[in-house]
Amino acid sequence: APNNLKATARKYNLQPCLIRRWKRSIIEREAAVTPEELAELTRADINKELRRKAVHPGSLGSLSVAEREHLKTYFAALRSAGNIVTVVMLTIELIRSAPDLNDLHFDIVKQRVHRFCRSNKFVPRRTTHTAQNHVYRDDVIADWVSYVRREILINPYSPAVVVSMDETNVDFDIMAKSTLDIRGARSVNVKSMGSSDRCTVILAVSASGEKLKPFLIFKGVSGARSRIALEFLNPALGYPQNLVYAVQPKAWNDSDTMRQWIDLIWRPFCVEKGLPTYLIWDEFSVHLMRQTVHQVQETGTQVDFVPAGYTGAVQILDKGINKPFKDYIKREQIQFMIDNPNRKPKRQHVARWIASSWENISVESITNTWRSVLGEW
């Protein structure tokens, strides 16, 4: 009652104006509900209303009404067709539809899309998830790091001639196990670009931040006159010429492709430096072959191996380069899928993705990763 408003305010240590505001808000909300809507209210709706901790619905965010509606329509169209939806994909589409957002950093727009997804209950939905648990022994890591640092200081090797090399797989298609969908959806399906092809790319970086040319291995019959090998030389297909290409029946790195990498990438690198070099790689079977080690040593290179099971801890590319490299490739894949919804990517498209992604890896990222493993020298 109005007469005991001040007494109630004193009892609960509140300002009377705050109680008046609450009362006015309740009256307005009750007046906004039509008899038809009131009749349709269920017990669950009433309980939900009683549990509300705030009357205000919250900020609409920094996106305009048109931008929000466009993203909702785009999201609904992709999910109804069974395509995956990611925050990055929505961000790229938003920037495409609103060119004025190009003036903002990509991550700022991405955060806005994150908030939009949360407010509309667009949440990641996973089909399966397998976790890996790596347990590294500190004494093994310390012994290996101490040994490598000693070799670098005794010989001595400058950062420009100390190199880490690794192979990594690149799928033509996005192998997604999650997508944004409506919370509570009973079934979650994902449609891919329809390509099961893959390739292997060999990457190498020096401690000074230099990036060696990526070496791509596609699936095909090897030989200088094979159809795929001739594709690489056709300028009409647009293969980036700052990459080196090879073919192998299963697109794996075997003794033959390893020899090509040594002849086409590593040997020219050693000749250019004109100094003894130091190559660090993992205990992959091809790396351990006597002929492979001998071929590398012929270039004036000392070879050392990362302990088995410790590549994630001390191998430079695994620790800090492969992840951002794969993220850049994924962004290229998403852009391709947006631009070509019903088209399979070809070898030349994947080669362009890899060239662009490798270009985006900064010297600072490389040198910081080396320092995080071996420290300064």
Image (cartoon, rainbow, N blue to C red):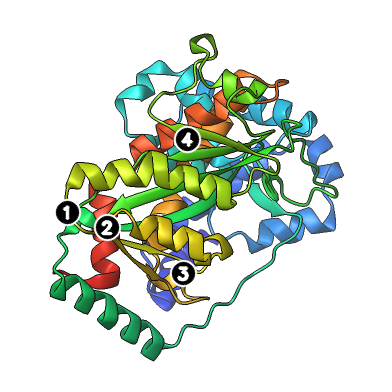
Q: What residue would you read off at disc 4? A: 354
Indicate the position of residue 203 as horizontal and vertical percent values. 42, 48
Tag 4: residue type? Ile
Instruction: Tell me the number on the disc at residue 275.
Output: 1
Residue type (three-letter) at the residue carrying disc 3: Thr
Please state which amino acid type lies under the numbered disc 1: Leu
State how far apart marks 3 and 4 are (Cα). Answer: 22 Å
Viewer-proximal residue among 237 and 349: 237
Instruction: Give the mark nearest the N terminus, 3 or 2.
Output: 2
Dot 4 or dot 2, earlier in sequence: 2
Mark 2 nearby-residue class (10 Å; few <14, some 14–19, many ≥20)? some
Specify which label sits upstream in the sequence, 1 or 4. 1
Q: Say whether marks 2 and 1 touch (CB < 8 Å).
A: yes
Q: CA distance from mark 1 to mark 4?
A: 30 Å
Q: CA distance from mark 3 to mark 2?
A: 25 Å
* Residue name at image x 53 percent, y 51 percent: 168
**Residue labelled with disc 3:** 311
**How would you rate the neighbour count of disc 1 (Cα within 10 Å): few for under 14, some for 14-19, many for 20 or more?**
some
Q: Quadrant of the N terminus?
A: bottom right
Q: Classify mark 4: helix, strand or loop.
A: helix
